[in-house]
Amino acid sequence: MIRRIALMSILLAAVVSAACSNGDTGGNGGNGGVTGIVSPTWITAQQVGETVSIPKGDLDSGKMLHFQVAYQNSDIAFMAYKLGGDYYVRANVCPPCGSIGFSLDGDTLVCDSCRTRFSASTGVGISGACVNYPKDDVAYEVSGASLTMEMDDLVTAYGNTLSPGLP
């Protein structure tokens, strides 16, 4: 009898837990109504002189974009996404684990390699092995159908992300 009550209690707890969870592992997070994990789409940014631009429409439709820019004979990587009506452009690098790649899980950035989690709105680390390397943001302007950034701002944000702590 006690075993049956214990089993029923466990089953009831599982049913209540399932009913309270809507199956949305990423929460709603305000990223354009997109739920769950948003995997990045790599694009080619337009680079003209010291100005870099990416399409705003892709961000408006809930995509997370990854792009690279040429700098001193190499490429440096960035990510862009829309969260709660605001656009974010950040350095796309996780220095300790060496990853270049993040996904958006609700309002959290998740390193695709080490799974360290960062606040998507602040770039500050939440949990994981690389938590001390916040993702610095890049200043941008909305220009027509694009977000435009200056190379100096991109390089500064990338450099800040390579060092532990906030600048």
Image (cartoon, grey):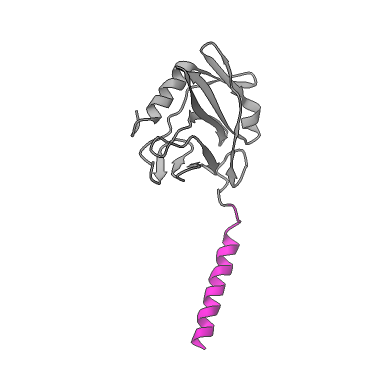
The residue range painted magenta reads 1-24
What percent of the width, then of the height, locates residue 128? Answer: 40, 46
What percent of the width, then of the height, locates residue 163? Answer: 35, 31
Q: Residue at x 62, y 42 (%)?
A: 34
**Residue 49 seen from this side:** yes
| Side (left or right) of 115 relative to 45 | left
- Check the image and report above or below for 128 versus 162: below
Determine the residue located farthest toward the bottom in the rendered image. Answer: 1
In terms of depth relative to the viewer, which is nearer, 129 or 10? 129
Quarter residue 58 falls in: top right
Determine the residue located farthest toward the front in the rendered image. Answer: 73
What percent of the width, then of the height, locates residue 102? Answer: 51, 38
Q: Which quadrant of the rendered structure holds the C terminus?
A: top left
- Does 158 lie within the magenta span? no
What percent of the width, then of the height, locates residue 5? Answer: 52, 82
Determine the residue located farthest toward the top in the rendered image. Answer: 49
- Does 19 lie within the magenta span? yes
**Residue 88 seen from this side:** no
In terms of depth relative to the viewer, which is nearer, 158 or 27? 158
| Side (left or right) of 122 relative to 31 | left
Q: Residue at x 61, y 56 (%)?
A: 22
- Check the image and report above or below for 48 versus 83: above
Identify the main secondary structure in magenta.
Answer: helix
Q: Residue at x 39, y 25 (%)?
A: 159
